[in-house]
Image: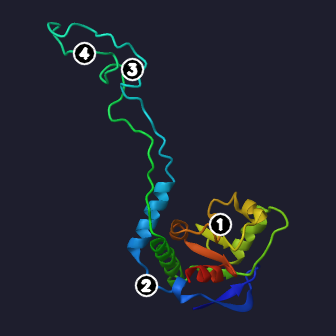
C-alpha cells in the first residue's frame, strides 16, 4: 500500500511512501483491540480510594450498655458502622486495576487499529517539519492544510519536539504523540491520523 506524502502547505510533494502490509494491512482482530483498550483504561485509574473500617477509627471501645435487658440491639463499641462516625463496611481500599497483556497481543491490537484506519483512508503522511517557536495558529493551519479533519486528529512524530507539542496543546481536537507513545486506544480514539514521514518505517521495523 502506497500513500502520497504531503508538504505542510497541503500540496503533494511528489513522493510516495510504502505502508507495510504487516502493520497497516492485516485482518483486524477486534478482541485483541478490546483487551488492549481495557488494559490501557484500567492503567489510567489511580486506585488509591480508601475509607476506614472499624479497626481504624479513633473512638472509644467502651461498651455502650449492658448485653441484655436494654430493649434494643447489643452493641460493644461506637466504632460499629451503624453509628455516625463509625467505620465503613466493605469500603474501598488501594488496589491496582491493571492487568498483564502479552506483547504479541498488544502488537496485534495496535496493528489491527492501524489497519482499520488504513482501510478507512484516515491516514495522512506529511513531510518532516519543525517549528522555530510554539505557535498554535501556525500549527492549526498546518492541520487545516492537510485536510485531516476538525475532530480528533492524532499526529504521530518520529521523535519528540517541544515546539510542536506546545503548539498543539491549546487545540482540544488535536493530540500530538511520538511513535514511542503510540497505543491502540489513541489510534482508535482518533478520527484521523497524521503520520510524519518515517513513522511508518519505524512501526514496520518494530514489527519484525
Q: Position of residue 179 (x, y in %)?
A: 64, 72
Position of residue 170 relative to residue 177, above or below, is above
In contact (CB < 8 Å): disc 3 and disc 2:
no
What numbered label is drawn on residue 75? 4
Q: Quadrant of residue 63?
A: top left
- In the rendered structure, the answer to whether residue 133 lies left or right of residue 59 reads right
Q: Tell me if residue 179 comes above or below residue 71 in the rendering.
A: below
Where's the C terminus, which quadrant? bottom right
Q: Which residue is labeled 2 in the image?
A: 27
Front position among marks 4 and 1:
4
Position of the N terminus, as image quadrant, is bottom right
Badge number at residue 18: none
Tag 1 residue? 177
Badge 3 marks a residue whose secondary structure is loop
Q: Kindly report the distance in space between the C-alpha atoms of the residues bearing marks 3 and 2.
A: 58 Å
Q: Nearer the viewer, residue 208 or 166?
A: 208
Establish if 64 lies above or below 42.
above
Between the C-alphas of marks 2 and 1, the distance is 25 Å
Ranked by sequence position, the earlier of labels 2 and 1 is 2
Which is nearer the N-term, disc 4 or disc 1?
4
Where residue 147 sits: x, y (%)? 65, 77
Tag count in the figure? Answer: 4
Instruction: Indicate the colouring scheme.
Output: rainbow
Residue 150 in sight in this render: no
Amino acid at each position: 500500500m502506497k500513500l502520497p506524502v504531503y508538504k505542510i502547505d497541503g500540496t503533494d510533494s511528489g513522493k510516495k511512501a510504502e505502508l507495510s502490509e504487516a502493520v497497516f494491512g492485516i485482518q483486524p482482530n477486534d478482541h485483541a483491540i478490546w483487551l488492549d483498550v481495557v488494559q490501557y483504561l484500567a492503567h489510567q485509574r489511580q486506585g488509591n480510594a480508601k475509607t476506614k473500617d472499624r479497626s481504624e477509627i479513633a473512638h472509644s471501645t467502651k461498651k455502650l450498655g449492658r448485653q441484655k435487658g436494654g430493649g434494643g440491639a447489643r452493641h460493644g463499641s461506637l466504632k460499629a458502622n451503624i453509628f455516625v462516625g463509625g467505620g465503613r463496611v466493605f469500603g474501598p481500599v488501594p488496589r491496582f486495576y491493571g492487568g498483564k497483556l502479552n506483547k504479541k497481543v498488544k502488537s496485534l491490537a495496535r496493528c489491527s487499529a492501524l489497519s482499520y484506519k488504513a482501510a478507512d483512508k484516515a491516514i495522512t503522511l506529511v513531510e518532516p517539519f519543525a517549528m522555530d517557536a510554539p505557535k498554535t495558529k501556525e500549527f492549526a493551519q498546518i492541520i487545516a492544510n492537510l485536510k485531516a479533519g476538525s475532530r480528533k486528529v492524532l499526529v504521530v512524530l518520529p521523535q519528540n519536539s517541544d515546539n510542536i507539542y506546545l503548539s498543539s496543546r491549546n487545540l482540544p481536537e488535536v493530540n500530538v504523540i511520538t511513535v514511542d507513545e503510540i497505543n491502540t486506544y489513541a489510534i482508535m480514539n482518533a478520527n484521523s491520523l497524521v503520520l510524519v514521514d518515517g513513522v511508518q518505517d519505524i512501526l514496520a521495523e518494530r514489527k519484525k
